[in-house]
Image (tube, grey):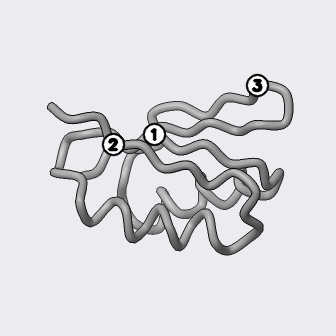
Amino acid sequence: MAEHVLNAEGLNCPLPILKAKKALKDVPPGEILKISATDPGSVADFAAFCNQTGNELVSSTTEGNVYRFEIRRT
């Protein structure tokens, strides 16, 4: 299982979501995409994105001003 990572730090809405959507196309079903972002709105955006797409938001954490997400592709 390869590690799938997306660095969306420094990008503002809607770019983190758009880049994640594109990156998920290369992630096999059942595997996880790890994302880091600095846009505070990304917390709500990724929750809504997963609800709309059916992908699983495995984790959402904050470390200082960096938001980290793990999304399992369904």
Q: Position of residue 74 (x, y in %)?
A: 24, 52
Task: Name which residue lies at 61% across and 34% down.
Answer: 60
2 or 1: tag closer to the N-terminus: 2
Q: Nearer the viewer, residue 3 or 67?
A: 3
Q: CA distance from mark 2 to mark 3?
A: 20 Å
Q: Amino acid at mark 1?
A: Lys
Q: State the mark number for residue 34.
A: 1
Task: Name which residue lies at 61% across and 42% down.
Answer: 36
Task: Name which residue lies at 68% across and 48% down.
Answer: 37
Horizontal arrangement in the rendering, residue 49 relative to residue 30 (left or right): right
Kindly identify which residue carries mark 2: 4
SS label for mark 2:
strand
Q: Position of residue 57 (x, y in %)?
A: 47, 42
Mark 2 near mark 1, Cβ–Cβ under 8 Å?
A: yes
Q: Nearer the viewer, residue 46 or 15?
A: 15
Q: State the mark number for residue 63.
A: 3
3 or 1: tag closer to the N-terminus: 1
Q: CA distance from mark 2 to mark 1?
A: 6 Å
